[in-house]
Image (spheres, rainbow, N blue to C red):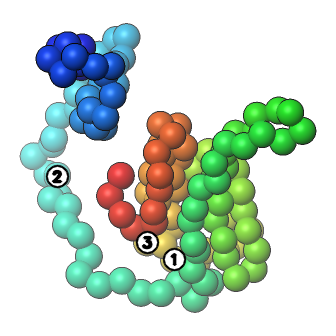
Amino acid sequence: MMMALAKERNSAPKDLGIDMLAAKEKRRRDFGKIPVSAVIAKAADSWHLDPAGCFRIEITQNEVRNGKMVAGKLMAQHKNGCITGTTAREVLDTIIGSGLVSRLDHAAYLGRELMKAELALKFNRSYSQDDEF
């Protein structure tokens, strides 16, 4: 599809958007089956601030330092410091291990946002907290 559009435009395949991305897998795994007793999920109507404090999540870009390429990082800034890492898991594990989160809903939110930030780094995309990826 990408090559057909490039041929039609008579140009290189560029500016086609993220919709052209196809994630492939070698082996397709079986899908799960929903049990009859499953509870239908719904989002909460309200949220509460975590007494342990809030986080600002950002990513840094790749940069050259001392002639070497340094990969971008995830960054979670808290009133008590800043945690950086290369994966959502290691940043979230450090946050939880440091006692910087006290509510389960806040930990779940941080996990979602850190995963979006990790994907943005992986695909060299920009990231803004609370925006759709």
Question: Residue 89's x, y, as percent?
Answer: 60, 48
Q: Residue at x 36, y 63 (%)?
A: 131
Q: How far separated are the C-alphas under marks 2 and 3?
A: 21 Å
Q: How far separated are the C-alphas under marks 3 and 1?
A: 5 Å
Q: Is residue 29 above or below residue 121?
A: above
**Residue 38, which numbered label?**
2
In contact (CB < 8 Å): disc 3 and disc 1: yes
Query: Depth-wise, is mark 1 or mark 2 nearer the camera?
Result: 1
Q: Along the line of sight, which residue is nearer the eye, 74 or 105?
A: 74
Q: Visible in this render: residue 19?
A: yes
- Judging by the rendered image, the residue that carries numbered circle 1 is 103
Label 3 crowd bin: few (<14), some (14–19), many (20+), radius 10 Å: some
Q: Is residue 116 above or below residue 109?
A: above
Question: Residue 80's x, y, as percent?
Answer: 75, 80
Residue 109 is drawn in which quadrant? bottom left
- Judging by the rendered image, the residue that carries numbered circle 3 is 105
- Looking at the rendered structure, the secondary structure element under dot 1 is loop
